[in-house]
Amino acid sequence: MKNLTRIINSEKGVAVIITVTIISVVMLIATLIANIVVTQLKLASDIADSITAIYAADSGVEYKLYQIRKEGNTAGVEFSLSNGAAISVAVSGTLPNLTIKSLGSYHTVKRQFEVSF
């Protein structure tokens, strides 16, 4: 009986050590999952910004083509859209051989189209 009591008394701290180890492992796994989720959310946000910048650059090309065909205006232009995207359009060359470069920017993302005709 004395041996059994001595064994039980010597193992009192084992439960605390096991509990702390399990909690540490669970916290590590939760931290890794949170890191993955945050990274994926940032990527999703960058994709949405990239799409907006691409549409802005495309709008700049279309706008400049319209101005060239309607007015013969080959001057560069910069403007902003209502969604906050900025567009910068540059035209090089002379008619009929023109190159239009349109840069669309949204937040920190920039996308550019180049059209030659």
Image (spheres, rainbow, N blue to C red):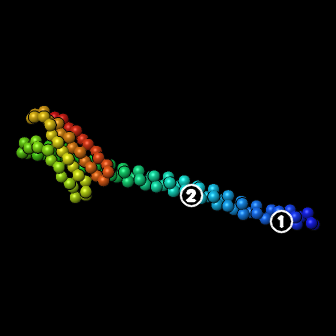
Residue name at image x 67 percent, y 59 percent: 22
Task: Give the total of numbered labels.
Answer: 2
Up the image or down, 52 lies above or below 116; here it is below
Q: CA distance from mark 1 to mark 2?
A: 34 Å
Q: In which quarter of the view is residue 97 placed? A: top left
> What is the crowding at mark 1: few (fewer than 14 residues within 10 Å), some, or many (at least 20)?
few
Residue name at image x 34 percent, y 52 percent: 48
Residue picked out by circle 2: 30
Up the image or down, 4 lies above or below 57; here it is below
Image quadrant where one finds the N terminus: bottom right
Q: Identify the secondary structure beneath mark 1.
A: helix
Q: Examine the rendering and report whether any part of residue 28 can be seen.
A: yes
Q: Is residue 103 left or right of residue 73?
A: right
Q: Position of residue 100 (x, y in %)?
A: 18, 39
Q: In which quarter of the view is residue 114 placed? A: top left
Closer-to-camera residue (39/96): 39
Residue name at image x 45 percent, y 52 percent: 40
Q: Examine the rendering and report whether any part of residue 68 can be seen.
A: no
Q: In which quarter of the view is residue 96 placed? A: top left
Which of pointers 1 and 2 indicates the residue nearer the eye? 1
Residue picked out by circle 1: 9
Q: Position of residue 53 (x, y in %)?
A: 28, 49
Q: Identify the secondary structure beneath mark 2.
A: helix
Three-letter amino acid code at the position of disc 1: Asn
> What is the crowding at mark 2: few (fewer than 14 residues within 10 Å), some, or many (at least 20)?
few
Farthest residue in the right direction? 1
In the rendered structure, which disc, 1 or 2, sits on the residue that comes first in sequence? 1
Closer-to-camera residue (51/22): 22
Three-letter amino acid code at the position of disc 2: Ala
Residue name at image x 31 percent, y 49 percent: 109
